């Protein structure tokens, strides 16, 4: 066992203190799982830039902030407005988590088709313990991932989303996670389990929003199984508050002829790391893993992806585009591994960043690892500035510079948003970007002096 | 009677780009309602002149003045010039993926209206204006729904420039090599668009390498720009003469 640092110790102490009150405390298998998790965390410690995979991202908020685990009382914080990105968010099926706890009053299961289950992990541990036991930690293996191990020890809630065999859900389902509503910094550890049985189809939007000004740490793990011939569209909006730390680890298994589409829009959060691993395990499997980000101030956004082609005839698409202003920083680490047997793999990766200020920085590390000989793979990464000619073109038509910049940023991110196959979600995310752009002043007087 | 102020008065203009002097004492005066053509060989400073009138960054005025309706334009932002009625039709219109042509035009029209203290057009009023202008210019409404200039043919791009001009209704229009890259049919359509916008209140400056555009848009005056200066001015017959003789007499090889 390594010697734990003063940053790591509080998490271990928090686990020891919280253990008796964690959900499913009476379940032996879960207690064992948690023990394995904390042991793994103690052995690995928190990731530091000394690790190759964490070279560009330092977990500074964990060093300078003392978080306490959330309590049930935190989950009862008053929420004035639930941010919803879907037009019928209020009426459609929607779950709302407040400070990491499901808030039934704000949630609705209205219109949820038969064969679809949307519940909170706590309830699932009571109602469907057998199913949870079978699925939990089945996909998300701790191995070298200490944040995942810590989540396994501390998991206190989360979303369970299940779609039965052959059930097709047309309407996107939204799950909102609201943070920032506590006076003291809190940490929560959502564990989300998603399973689409063979032939099922569904669209899920998880919306991570900061409603208050409090600092918080979300260390989430999501495990996704997409069954044979199933199709899952998994969209995420990260609009966390300025002092939030958003750590998300997702593991996905894609079966034969199945399709998995992921899109993450990141527009807020002091520090975020969205790490996703997709295993294409069945022939004909497809995944697209995409994202757009818009960072400012001293925000830091890390997208780390690993796509594993394990069998013949699988396809992946990856498009990440981001815009960085002020002193913000982004990291893109995209690794595609084509295993020995994965002949006829078709893989394409693209990563583009736009730097709006000289203080902004992007570290991009695209990696292709190919062990098969009959494959079609490509990748590309570019970094640039706003096109001066395009800016002049817009301004020469009377568009004020600030608005011209916004339009060009929108235009730039649009190429990534085009990857979203749900028209409704694409529009909602486009609107989200428009609202996240700096306000434009139209007053003629200010223009003149500005 | 008060002395009539010209629409555009350029006096002894010196402009450098990247430290290199391109315009070396250019003089030009365009009266209200007039159409002037500037012809010249490649590298004579034609595009520099159009960019500096529209206010593009990177064009440093080292001497002289550009006066528009009695006001010195030096240091004025391009969007303010647009709001005051200056329009530049680009030689190479820029493609802007993901921004619909209508969105772009609506932002432009309303920005200018706000600047002038006029009420913004709502969606219906704007649509009505667009329908009218596209009909006048024979432009398909499909072009409006597409992203700005993305996937447009050369002719469509230039027609889109004329549409923007029609909608923004400038008092000084500068057409920078609008004829370049157009076949004769496209050229006729663009010329017809410009002619339909002829008005006693509007002045137009046509910048071109070739005479053929001037067969369709007949100018009041023609100027020859070479070596950064206006070398000669005359009536429309000067264009025909240049077409025959080339620019050799101005010390530049015919292109």
Image (tube, coloured by chain):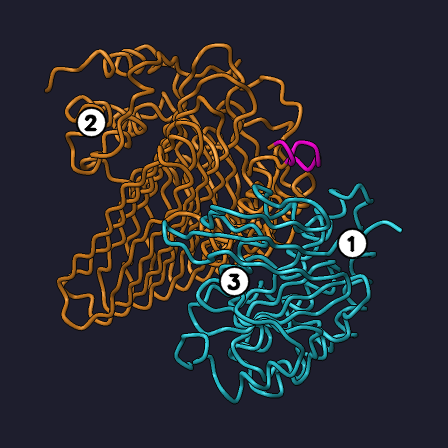
A117 vs B43, left or right, is right
Residue closest to the far right: B1
> What residue sits right under mark 1 in the picture?
B123
- A415, A235: nearer the viewer: A415
- A96, B43: nearer the viewer: B43
| Front: mark 3 or 2 | 3
| Front: mark 3 or 1 | 3
Q: Secondary structure at mark 3?
A: loop
- Mark 1 vs mark 2: same chain? no
Q: Secondary structure at mark 2?
A: loop
Chain on which label 2 sits: A
- Mark 3 vs mark 1: same chain? yes
Colour in which the image shows chain A: orange
Q: Which mark is residue A48?
A: 2
The residue sitting at 16% across, 27% down in the picture is A44
Q: CA distance from mark 1 to mark 2?
A: 53 Å
Q: How many marks?
A: 3
Q: Which mark is residue B94?
A: 3
Q: CA distance from mark 3 to mark 1?
A: 25 Å
Residue closest to the far left: A1
The residue sitting at 12% across, 15% down in the picture is A3
Q: CA distance from mark 3 to mark 2?
A: 45 Å
Estimate how packed mark 1 is, as few (under 14), some (14 to 19) or many (20 or more) residues with alpha carbons within 10 Å. Answer: few
The chain letter of the cyan chain reads B
The residue sitting at 20% across, 38% down in the picture is A53
Residue stretch in magenta: A441-449
- Res A151 seen here: yes
Residue A341 x %, y % = 16, 66
């Amino acid at each position: 066992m390594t010697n734990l640092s003063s940053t790591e110790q509080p998490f271990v102490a928090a686990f020891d203190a919280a253990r008796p009150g964690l959900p499913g405390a009476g379940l032996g298998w879960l207690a064992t799982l948690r023990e394995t998790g904390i042991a793994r965390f103690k052995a690995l410690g928190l990731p530091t830039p000394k690790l190759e995979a964490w070279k560009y991202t330092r977990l500074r908020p964990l060093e300078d902030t003392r978080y306490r685990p959330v309590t049930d009382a935190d989950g009862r914080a008053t929420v004035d407005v639930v941010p919803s990105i879907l037009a019928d968010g209020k009426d459609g099926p929607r779950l709302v988590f407040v400070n990491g706890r499901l808030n039934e009053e704000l949630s609705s299961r209205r219109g949820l088709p038969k064969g679809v289950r949307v519940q909170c992990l706590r309830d699932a541990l009571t109602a469907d313990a057998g199913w949870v036991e079978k699925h939990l930690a089945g996909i998300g293996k701790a191995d070298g991932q200490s944040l995942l191990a810590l989540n396994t020890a501390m998991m206190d809630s989360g979303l369970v989303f299940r779609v039965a065999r052959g059930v097709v859900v047309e309407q996107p389902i939204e799950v909102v996670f609201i943070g920032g509503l506590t006076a003291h910094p809190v940490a929560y550890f959502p564990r989300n389990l998603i399973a689409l049985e063979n032939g099922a189809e569904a669209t899920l939007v998880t919306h991570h929003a900061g409603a208050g000004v409090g600092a918080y740490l979300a260390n989430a793990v999501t495990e996704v199984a997409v069954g044979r011939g199933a199709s899952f569209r998994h969209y995420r909006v990260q609009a966390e508050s300025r002092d939030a730390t958003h750590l998300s680890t997702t593991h996905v298994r894609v079966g034969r002829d199945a399709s998995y589409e992921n899109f993450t829009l990141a527009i807020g959060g002091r520090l975020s790391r969205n790490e996703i691993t997709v295993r294409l395990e069945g022939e004909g499997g497809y995944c697209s893993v995409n994202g757009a980000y818009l960072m400012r101030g001293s925000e830091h956004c890390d997208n780390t992806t690993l796509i594993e082609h394990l069998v013949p005839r699988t396809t992946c698409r990856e498009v990440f585009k981001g815009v960085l202003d002020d002193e913000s920083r982004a990291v893109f680490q995209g690794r595609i591994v084509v295993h020995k047997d994965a002949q006829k793999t078709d893989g394409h990766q693209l990563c583009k960043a736009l730097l709006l200020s000289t203080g902004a920085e992007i570290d991009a590390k695209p990696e292709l690892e190919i062990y098969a000989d009959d494959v079609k793979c490509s990748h590309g990464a570019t970094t640039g500035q706003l096109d001066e000619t395009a800016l002049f073109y817009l301004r020469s038509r009377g568009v004020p510079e600030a608005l011209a910049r916004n339009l060009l940023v929108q235009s730039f991110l649009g190429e990534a948003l085009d990857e979203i196959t749900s028209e409704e979600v694409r529009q909602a995310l486009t609107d989200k970007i428009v609202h996240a752009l700096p306000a434009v002043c139209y007053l003629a007087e200010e223009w003149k002096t500005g | 009677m008060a002395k009539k102020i010209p629409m555009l008065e350029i006096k002894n203009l010196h402009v450098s780009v990247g430290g290199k002097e391109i315009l070396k004492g250019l003089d030009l005066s365009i009266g209200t309602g007039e159409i002037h053509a500037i012809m010249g060989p490649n590298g004579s400073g034609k595009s520099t002149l159009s960019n500096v009138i529209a206010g593009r960054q990177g064009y440093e005025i080292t001497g002289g003045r550009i006066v528009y309706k009695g006001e010195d334009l030096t240091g004025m932002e391009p969007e303010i010039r647009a709001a005051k009625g200056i329009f530049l039709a680009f030689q190479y219109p820029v493609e802007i993926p993901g921004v619909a042509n209508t969105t772009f035009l609506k932002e432009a029209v309303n920005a200018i209206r706000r600047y002038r203290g006029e009420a913004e057009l709502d969606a219906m009023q704007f649509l009505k204006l667009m329908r009218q202008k596209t009909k006048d210019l024979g432009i398909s409404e499909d072009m409006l729904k597409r992203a700005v200039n993305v996937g447009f043919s050369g002719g469509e791009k230039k027609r889109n420039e004329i549409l923007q001009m029609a909608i923004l209704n400038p008092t000084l229009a500068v057409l920078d090599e609008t004829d370049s890259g157009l076949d004769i049919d496209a050229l006729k359509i663009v010329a017809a668009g410009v002619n339909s916008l002829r008005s006693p209140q509007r002045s137009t400056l046509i910048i071109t390498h070739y005479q053929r555009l001037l067969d369709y848009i007949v100018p009041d005056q023609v100027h020859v720009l070479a070596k950064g200066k206006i070398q000669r001015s005359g009536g429309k017959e000067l264009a025909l003469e240049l077409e025959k003789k080339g620019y050799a007499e101005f010390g530049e090889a015919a292109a």
